[in-house]
Image: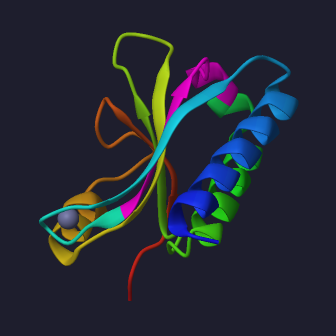
């Protein structure tokens, strides 16, 4: 399969899993693999219809699905997070990011699940 075929398949599978789990129409409107100038790389899963409550209640399941999606795309699943829309109940995206050293240092200084108002951490593996 080409990278776009792999993306398309995983977009569909993750959307179906989220819909089954939450029993409501969640949409993955776009799934993007990215590489940033700083060295960070990963995948962004842009969602519609996914809410903060869903994440709190089904965090373990959603974390598991995102981990699997990330690994299917051969992206290390060491840092998984949801991007929130501050002041609303909406989740903008689910993300898996392989942090560059500088961004790792920034995130490792924070603590708790919400180091920033727009970030909810699902998984953060500290480096030795
Ligand atoms: Zn970075």
Residue furthest top as drawn: 88
88, above or below 26, in the image: above
* Residue 51 falls inside the magenta stretch: yes
Q: Which residue appears at 20% of the width and 61% of the height? A: 36
115 vs 58, nearest the viewer: 58
12, above or below 57, in the image: below
**Way the structure is coloured:** rainbow
78 vs 57, nearest the viewer: 78
In the rendered view, does 27 fall on the left or right side of 47?
A: right
46 vs 67, nearest the viewer: 46
Measured from the top left, where is residue 100 in percent x and y? 23, 73
Measured from the top left, where is residue 76 in percent x and y? 51, 75
Measured from the top left, where is residue 2 in percent x and y? 56, 70
Magenta segment range? 42-54
* Residue 101 falls inside the magenta stretch: no
Ligand 1 is found in the corner quadrant, namely: bottom left
- Quadrant including the C terminus: bottom left
Measured from the top left, where is residue 34 in percent x and y? 33, 58
Residue furthest bottom as drawn: 128
Q: Which of the 4 image quarters holds residue 24?
A: top right
- Quadrant including the N terminus: bottom right
Q: Which residue appears at 73% of the width and 30% of the height? A: 57
Q: Which residue appears at 50% of the width and 72% of the height? A: 75
- The image shows a total of numbered marks equal to 0
């Amino acid at each position: 399969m080409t990278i776009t075929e792999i993306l398309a398949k995983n977009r569909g599978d993750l959307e179906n899993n989220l819909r089954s789990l939450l029993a409501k129409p969640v949409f993955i409107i776009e799934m993007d693999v990215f590489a940033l100038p700083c060295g960070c790389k990963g995948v962004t899963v842009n969602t519609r219809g996914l809410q903060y409550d869903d994440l709190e209640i089904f965090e373990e399941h959603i974390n598991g699905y995102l981990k699997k999606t990330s690994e299917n795309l051969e992206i290390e699943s060491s840092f998984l997070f949801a991007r929130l829309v501050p002041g609303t109940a909406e989740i903008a995206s689910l993300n898996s990011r392989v942090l560059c050293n500088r961004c790792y240092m920034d995130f490792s200084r924070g603590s708790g699940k919400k180091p920033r108002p727009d970030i909810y951490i699902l998984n953060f593996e500290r480096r030795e």
